[in-house]
Image: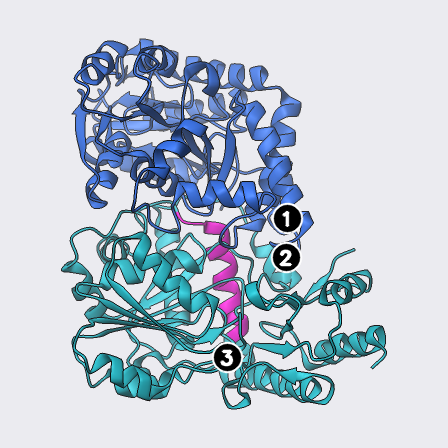
Chain colours: A blue, B cyan
Amino acid sequence: MHKKLFIPGPVEVKDDVLKMMAKPMIGHRTKEASKLQRDISEKLMKLFYTENQIILSTTSGSGLMESAIRSCTRKRAAVFAVGAFGKRWYEMAIANNVPADLYEVEWGTPTTKESVDEVLATGKYDVVTVTHNETSTGVMNPVDEIGEVVKKYPDVVFLVDAVSSAGGAKIEVDKCGIDVCITSTQKALGLPPGLAICTASEKAIEAARQVEHRGFYLDLVKLYDTIKKKDHQYPSTPSLSHMFALDYKLDKILEEGLDNRFNRHAEMAKYVRNWANEYFELLPDERYASNTLTNIKNTREISVGELNKALGERGFMISNGYGKLKEKTFRIAHMADTTLEEVKELLENIEDILKL
Amino acid sequence: MHKKLFIPGPVEVKDDVLKMMAKPMIGHRTKEASKLQRDISEKLMKLFYTENQIILSTTSGSGLMESAIRSCTRKRAAVFAVGAFGKRWYEMAIANNVPADLYEVEWGTPTTKESVDEVLATGKYDVVTVTHNETSTGVMNPVDEIGEVVKKYPDVVFLVDAVSSAGGAKIEVDKCGIDVCITSTQKALGLPPGLAICTASEKAIEAARQVEHRGFYLDLVKLYDTIKKKDHQYPSTPSLSHMFALDYKLDKILEEGLDNRFNRHAEMAKYVRNWANEYFELLPDERYASNTLTNIKNTREISVGELNKALGERGFMISNGYGKLKEKTFRIAHMADTTLEEVKELLENIEDILKL
């Protein structure tokens, strides 16, 4: 039996979108392929509220995160982590011999503009990384407020992990001054995994040009320059199937309307948070709770594994707590094309299983 | 109109395989996902005639090539190039500050066991890279003979780019002593682009453990260890759609029979070579001509661009010469599920257009 996915990616993908994954192949050095990349870019520029270049990478979101921190750090990167995926930026820097410092907070609390300001004021850094939406904790950071602070430091390149939020929450890239904003297909955009997406400012690319060893496959400059010089093509063969599906899906997203889509996510999140407050507790500070995923403290000491097994028999799947939070929390994703009705159905099933 | 692809990837993908790209999503941390990776691995071990670990990477073939040369080079890499893709190994090394030397030959000639022996005898190298099948020239190198020579140097890790040949020509990984043999889905395997595949020997992984900075997303050790420790799962979310299709397609390949499949490729190659010798000339030394792609010298000084345009109107696509060989050669790929009948039909159309 297929299980309806309420996990933070892969998400449920609609049948019409899946069908686009099955389109016949075309040459990746053809005008048709250039047009596909151009069309996708124009639609993604709307979604990200940006005039910056859109870059696709046939990797998971991690691929472009590594690409950004390795390519753009000339001096030293300040990594602000509010959970496991924030910390991943730091691991990526260290694995590439890129100088970086990690600034962590207690899981469930956000990155504040004050902390970013204090750290950048030291003058030690030329890159700052922030997680917009952290799925290990369910925190959504105020990237707009943080962006205002980063603007005070003109040499600092601002990298944002929006892997689990872009398409489900409004991120105004240009207004926030985000230099590289990264996401991937299998989260709030509602596509299968296999393709990463970022916006790249000229400032980010110029910074990267000063870095000598940026690697090959994940070199942000190589990706950028090839798109510019080779009529919107890529250095290597991209996942055309994902591009067909993404192009189609972006039309559907724009048809729904970005504000409608973000509001639907906010409404689902509010419903799940109210439910969590009634029967359990929220892990994150509610003022910074995510609109795409809710992380719930297991205050009743249920077996999350058993709950998920019982849900599986009814055709649903949620997520256990991440890493050190396994069995201590459980996570319900409400992203992409999930509806409030489906969320209600899931929660009713949980109530029924747990006899709440 | 859809154009039937006779280009060296992406190739034509059969409808039943395309349909598998449209399967509904599953969680990538489930037993179902582990089983999928395990099943794929077992089938690929047959295709590569190996007991080594199979590793998948959501990248193009270039991703795993970079992964291998960066991860495994402790001292210095000897890169043997017979064309543009061979040279790419060298560009990857340089882009990662990995010490490497490039050994090039005239385009159309192969890498010989004697040249490899001579270079390795210097004792300067602990990695050697060889292209099995070079699509820029149409040369297929004798990796079995080269492998015999590499075995004389027990510290040397043997990396082979089989991106455009695996699944279309026999490569006995263990017998040849290949430590990392790399391919990707969109060539002779007959799938859409978006997933890379390699075999990894324990020797390669142990060598890589001695390298301090291997990066994150393309770290061969991280990929290997996660598969071993986490029940055949991956550090990041893989392209499940490609995995569904690959699992299915490998069944079809094994049903066809590996020898039958390799013979079909040999037969198509022989036919195209004979045709080329009749009307044009072969670029490569015929003793080393590829079984998956034929590179033909444009001795009649036709416009390859115009020929391809005329073919396009009839529903076919071939490739122009690569890079510096543009208009000087043209290339016909005969790989994956292409049949001799389809090759004949293409060549008849070329004869008709060129009035041969």
Q: Which residues are magenta?
A: B238-253
Which one is closest to the eye, mark 2 or mark 3? 3
Q: Are marks 3 and 1 on the same chain?
A: no
Which quadrant of the figure has residue A71? top left
Query: Toward the viewer: B111 or B237?
Result: B111
Check disc 3: other Cα within 10 Å, few if <14, some if 14-19, many if 20+. Answer: many
Query: Toward the viewer: B272 or B34?
Result: B272
For disc 1, the marked residue is: A33
For disc 3, the marked residue is: B139
Query: Toward the viewer: B130 or A23?
Result: B130
Chain letter for the residue marked with disc 2 in the picture: A
CA–CA distance in space, label 2 to label 3? 22 Å
Quadrant containing the C terminus of chain A is top left
Secondary structure at badge 1 equals helix
Indicate the position of residue B113 as horizontal and vertical percent values: 33, 87
| Residue type at tag 3 | Val
Chain letter for the residue marked with disc 3 in the picture: B
Check disc 2: other Cα within 10 Å, few if <14, some if 14-19, many if 20+. Answer: many
- Note whether residue A290 is visible: yes
Name the N-terminal-most of marks 2 and 1.
2
- Note whether residue A277 is visible: no
For disc 2, the marked residue is: A27
| Residue type at tag 1 | Ala
Q: Would residue B342 be found to the left or right of residue B19 on screen?
A: right
Q: In the image, is residue A114 part of the stretch drawn in magenta?
A: no
CA–CA distance in space, label 3 to label 1? 28 Å
Indicate the position of residue A351 as horizontal and vertical percent values: 38, 22
Q: Are marks 3 and 1 in contact (CB under 8 Å)?
A: no
